[in-house]
Amino acid sequence: MAFSKAMFLAAVMSVLVAVISAAEAPAPSPTSPAAAVSPSFVAGVLAAGAALAFGSALRI
């Protein structure tokens, strides 16, 4: 039961990250700094955080 619940949560998190990363990002203004965080970087950090959380919770 716990394994199926963890798999369901992992699937929901992966869909959520995919939807967030697929959202249209506005074009940066010409005066914005070059060090702005890109949406793909944020999606990568979220995916790594989810993998860390679920990996330590499942103890695989």
Image: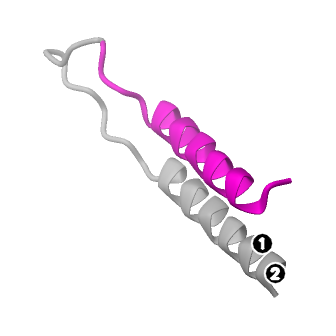
Measure the C-alpha gap from mark 2 to mark 1: 5 Å
Find residue 42 and report its horizontal and vertical position in percent.
Answer: 46, 38
User: Which residue appears at 73% of the width and 81% of the height?
Assistant: 5
Q: How crowded is mark 1: few (under 14 residues within 10 Å), some or many (20 or more)?
A: some
**Position above or below: 26 against 54:** above
Q: Find out whether residue 46 is within the magenta segment.
A: yes
Q: Which residue is drawn at 19% across and 16% down?
A: 30
* Numbered disc total: 2
The three-letter code of the residue at mark 2 reads Ser
Residue bearing the label numbered 2: 4
Mark 1 and mark 2 in contact (Cβ < 8 Å)? yes
Helix, strand or loop status at disc 2: helix
Residue at position x 29%, y 11% from top?
A: 34
| Circle 1: residue type | Met
On the image, the x and y values in percent for residue 44 come to 57, 37
Is residue 54 part of the magenta span, yes or no? Answer: yes
Q: Which residue is outermost to the left?
A: 31
Query: Magenta stretch?
Result: 35-60
Taken as a whole, is the magenta stretch helix, strand or loop? helix
Q: Nearer the viewer, residue 17 or 55?
A: 55
Residue 39 position in % (x across, y down) = 44, 37
Which residue in the structure is indicated by mark 1?
7
